[in-house]
Image: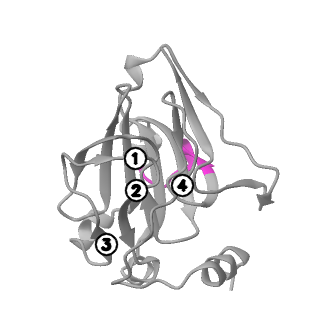
Amino acid sequence: MSLLNKIRTSLFTPSEDAVPEPASFATRADTVYAPISGVLVSVQEINDEVIASGMLGDGYGIIPVGNTIYAPNNGRVNTVTVTNHAVGIMTDTGVEVLIHVGIDTVKMEGKGFMRHVEAGDIVTAGTPLLTFNPETIKAAGYDDMVTVVISNPERFRKIDHVASSNTMIGGRPLVKLGDPLLVTRA
Protein backbone atom coordinates (compact mmCIF):
# COMPACT_ATOMS: atom_id res chain seq x y z
CA MET A 1 0.00 0.00 0.00
CA SER A 2 1.45 3.38 -0.99
CA LEU A 3 2.07 6.09 1.59
CA LEU A 4 -0.71 8.23 0.12
CA ASN A 5 -3.22 5.37 0.37
CA LYS A 6 -2.18 4.74 3.98
CA ILE A 7 -2.81 8.40 4.78
CA ARG A 8 -6.17 8.34 3.00
CA THR A 9 -7.45 5.25 4.81
CA SER A 10 -6.22 6.45 8.20
CA LEU A 11 -7.95 9.84 7.92
CA PHE A 12 -11.43 8.77 6.81
CA THR A 13 -13.73 5.94 6.08
CA PRO A 14 -16.04 6.67 3.15
CA SER A 15 -19.73 6.51 3.95
CA GLU A 16 -22.38 6.83 1.26
CA ASP A 17 -25.07 8.22 3.55
CA ALA A 18 -23.10 10.41 5.97
CA VAL A 19 -24.10 14.06 5.98
CA PRO A 20 -20.90 16.11 6.24
CA GLU A 21 -20.58 18.88 8.77
CA PRO A 22 -19.73 22.36 7.45
CA ALA A 23 -16.09 23.39 7.70
CA SER A 24 -14.95 26.76 8.96
CA PHE A 25 -12.05 28.82 7.66
CA ALA A 26 -11.25 32.51 7.21
CA THR A 27 -11.60 33.89 3.70
CA ARG A 28 -10.83 36.92 1.57
CA ALA A 29 -12.98 37.84 -1.43
CA ASP A 30 -10.05 37.74 -3.89
CA THR A 31 -8.80 34.28 -2.87
CA VAL A 32 -9.85 30.75 -3.84
CA TYR A 33 -9.26 28.22 -1.06
CA ALA A 34 -8.67 24.46 -1.10
CA PRO A 35 -12.06 22.66 -1.17
CA ILE A 36 -10.47 19.44 0.14
CA SER A 37 -7.20 18.36 1.75
CA GLY A 38 -4.61 16.47 -0.26
CA VAL A 39 -1.45 16.55 -2.32
CA LEU A 40 -1.12 19.49 -4.71
CA VAL A 41 -0.20 19.16 -8.40
CA SER A 42 -0.07 21.72 -11.18
CA VAL A 43 -3.02 21.73 -13.55
CA GLN A 44 -0.63 20.91 -16.41
CA GLU A 45 0.21 17.57 -14.73
CA ILE A 46 -3.41 16.37 -14.62
CA ASN A 47 -3.89 13.35 -16.86
CA ASP A 48 -6.63 14.95 -18.96
CA GLU A 49 -5.82 16.92 -22.12
CA VAL A 50 -8.69 19.41 -21.73
CA ILE A 51 -7.86 20.22 -18.11
CA ALA A 52 -4.07 20.19 -18.57
CA SER A 53 -4.29 22.54 -21.56
CA GLY A 54 -6.06 25.15 -19.42
CA MET A 55 -9.28 25.02 -21.45
CA LEU A 56 -11.33 24.77 -18.24
CA GLY A 57 -9.36 27.52 -16.51
CA ASP A 58 -6.36 28.29 -14.34
CA GLY A 59 -5.76 26.41 -11.11
CA TYR A 60 -4.52 23.24 -9.45
CA GLY A 61 -5.14 19.54 -9.11
CA ILE A 62 -5.43 17.95 -5.68
CA ILE A 63 -4.92 14.24 -5.03
CA PRO A 64 -7.61 14.10 -2.35
CA VAL A 65 -7.38 12.92 1.21
CA GLY A 66 -11.03 12.72 2.18
CA ASN A 67 -14.29 12.46 0.33
CA THR A 68 -16.10 15.78 0.77
CA ILE A 69 -15.80 18.86 -1.42
CA TYR A 70 -16.49 22.12 0.43
CA ALA A 71 -17.23 25.57 -0.97
CA PRO A 72 -13.88 27.33 -1.45
CA ASN A 73 -15.52 30.77 -1.28
CA ASN A 74 -18.74 32.58 -0.53
CA GLY A 75 -21.03 32.77 -3.54
CA ARG A 76 -23.83 31.24 -5.55
CA VAL A 77 -23.81 27.73 -6.99
CA ASN A 78 -24.18 28.29 -10.72
CA THR A 79 -23.57 24.73 -11.96
CA VAL A 80 -24.04 21.21 -10.63
CA THR A 81 -23.67 18.38 -13.11
CA VAL A 82 -26.43 15.78 -13.25
CA THR A 83 -23.73 13.19 -12.55
CA ASN A 84 -22.76 15.08 -9.36
CA HIS A 85 -19.03 15.02 -10.15
CA ALA A 86 -18.57 18.76 -10.71
CA VAL A 87 -19.86 22.01 -9.26
CA GLY A 88 -19.35 25.64 -10.19
CA ILE A 89 -19.58 28.67 -7.93
CA MET A 90 -19.78 32.35 -8.84
CA THR A 91 -18.18 34.23 -5.96
CA ASP A 92 -19.47 37.52 -4.65
CA THR A 93 -16.64 39.26 -6.56
CA GLY A 94 -17.29 37.60 -9.94
CA VAL A 95 -14.76 34.76 -9.79
CA GLU A 96 -16.10 31.60 -11.44
CA VAL A 97 -14.68 28.58 -9.61
CA LEU A 98 -15.08 25.11 -11.08
CA ILE A 99 -14.43 22.03 -8.96
CA HIS A 100 -14.29 18.75 -10.87
CA VAL A 101 -13.84 15.36 -9.16
CA GLY A 102 -12.01 12.68 -11.09
CA ILE A 103 -10.79 12.09 -14.61
CA ASP A 104 -13.52 10.84 -16.98
CA THR A 105 -15.83 10.25 -14.01
CA VAL A 106 -18.74 11.65 -16.02
CA LYS A 107 -18.85 8.11 -17.49
CA MET A 108 -19.82 6.80 -14.04
CA GLU A 109 -23.24 8.43 -14.47
CA GLY A 110 -23.37 9.62 -10.86
CA LYS A 111 -22.46 6.32 -9.17
CA GLY A 112 -20.33 7.06 -6.12
CA PHE A 113 -21.26 10.77 -5.98
CA MET A 114 -23.78 12.67 -3.86
CA ARG A 115 -24.55 16.37 -4.13
CA HIS A 116 -25.52 18.55 -1.19
CA VAL A 117 -26.40 21.74 -3.10
CA GLU A 118 -28.44 22.76 -6.11
CA ALA A 119 -27.88 25.42 -8.76
CA GLY A 120 -28.92 28.79 -7.37
CA ASP A 121 -28.05 27.97 -3.74
CA ILE A 122 -26.15 30.64 -1.82
CA VAL A 123 -23.17 29.10 -0.01
CA THR A 124 -20.51 30.27 2.40
CA ALA A 125 -16.93 29.02 2.43
CA GLY A 126 -16.94 25.60 4.09
CA THR A 127 -20.44 24.55 2.98
CA PRO A 128 -20.42 20.87 1.90
CA LEU A 129 -21.02 20.77 -1.87
CA LEU A 130 -20.68 17.09 -2.71
CA THR A 131 -19.25 13.84 -1.46
CA PHE A 132 -17.69 11.04 -3.44
CA ASN A 133 -16.53 7.51 -2.79
CA PRO A 134 -12.88 7.16 -3.84
CA GLU A 135 -13.12 3.37 -3.77
CA THR A 136 -16.05 3.39 -6.20
CA ILE A 137 -14.12 5.71 -8.54
CA LYS A 138 -11.02 3.49 -8.42
CA ALA A 139 -13.08 0.29 -8.86
CA ALA A 140 -14.56 1.82 -12.03
CA GLY A 141 -11.01 2.38 -13.30
CA TYR A 142 -10.86 6.15 -12.91
CA ASP A 143 -8.63 8.63 -11.11
CA ASP A 144 -10.13 10.67 -8.22
CA MET A 145 -8.02 13.80 -8.88
CA VAL A 146 -9.87 16.95 -7.81
CA THR A 147 -9.44 19.90 -10.17
CA VAL A 148 -9.96 23.44 -8.85
CA VAL A 149 -9.85 26.19 -11.46
CA ILE A 150 -10.89 29.75 -12.03
CA SER A 151 -12.89 29.29 -15.23
CA ASN A 152 -12.98 32.98 -16.18
CA PRO A 153 -9.27 33.92 -15.89
CA GLU A 154 -9.55 36.47 -18.72
CA ARG A 155 -11.55 38.69 -16.33
CA PHE A 156 -8.45 39.27 -14.20
CA ARG A 157 -5.18 41.02 -14.85
CA LYS A 158 -3.33 38.27 -13.00
CA ILE A 159 -3.96 35.10 -11.02
CA ASP A 160 -1.32 34.32 -8.42
CA HIS A 161 -0.73 30.68 -7.52
CA VAL A 162 -0.10 30.93 -3.79
CA ALA A 163 -0.53 27.35 -2.54
CA SER A 164 2.47 26.23 -0.57
CA SER A 165 3.27 23.95 2.31
CA ASN A 166 6.21 23.03 4.47
CA THR A 167 4.90 19.46 4.53
CA MET A 168 5.82 17.44 1.45
CA ILE A 169 5.00 13.96 0.18
CA GLY A 170 7.02 12.73 -2.77
CA GLY A 171 8.31 16.27 -3.36
CA ARG A 172 4.78 17.69 -3.58
CA PRO A 173 3.16 20.02 -1.05
CA LEU A 174 0.23 18.96 1.07
CA VAL A 175 -2.67 21.36 1.32
CA LYS A 176 -5.43 21.26 3.85
CA LEU A 177 -9.03 22.31 3.52
CA GLY A 178 -9.18 26.11 3.56
CA ASP A 179 -5.57 26.77 2.56
CA PRO A 180 -5.27 29.60 0.00
CA LEU A 181 -4.69 28.36 -3.57
CA LEU A 182 -5.28 31.23 -6.00
CA VAL A 183 -5.47 35.02 -5.62
CA THR A 184 -7.11 37.13 -8.31
CA ARG A 185 -5.76 40.56 -9.25
CA ALA A 186 -8.22 42.89 -10.99
Q: How far from the left and from the top, in percent, is residue 27?
A: 54, 39
Q: CA distance from mark 4 to mark 2?
A: 8 Å
Residue type at mark 4: give it: Ser
Q: How far from the left and from the top, in percent, is residue 91?
A: 36, 34
Q: Quadrant of residue 105?
A: bottom left
Q: Nearer the viewer, residue 108 or 7?
A: 7
Residue type at mark 2: give it: Thr
Q: Is residue 5 above or below residue 27?
A: below
Q: Quadrant of residue 75?
A: top left
Residue 77 belongs to the span the image colors magenta: no
Query: Are circles 4 and 2 on residues that touch, CB within 8 Å?
Result: no
Q: For numbered disc 2, what is the local secondary structure?
A: loop
Q: For numbered disc 4, what is the local secondary structure?
A: loop
The residue at which mark 3 appears reads as 113
Residue 43 belongs to the span the image colors magenta: yes
Work out whether mark 1 precedes mark 4 in sequence or the reverse, and give the earlier one. Answer: 4
Residue type at mark 1: give it: Thr
Is 49 on the left-hand or right-hand side of 185?
left
Work out whether mark 4 precedes mark 2 in sequence or the reverse, and give the earlier one. Answer: 4
Q: For numbered disc 3, what is the local secondary structure?
A: strand
For discs 2 and 3, the disc positioned in front in the rendered view:
2
Q: CA distance from mark 1 to mark 2?
A: 6 Å
Q: Which mark is residue 124?
A: 1
Q: CA distance from mark 1 to mark 3?
A: 21 Å
The residue at which mark 4 appears reads as 24
For discs 3 and 4, the disc positioned in front in the rendered view:
4
Q: How many marks?
A: 4
Quarter of the image for the N terminus: give it: bottom right
User: Magenta segment range?
Assistant: 41-48
Query: Are circles 1 and 2 on residues that touch, CB within 8 Å?
Result: yes
Q: How is this picture coloured?
A: one colour
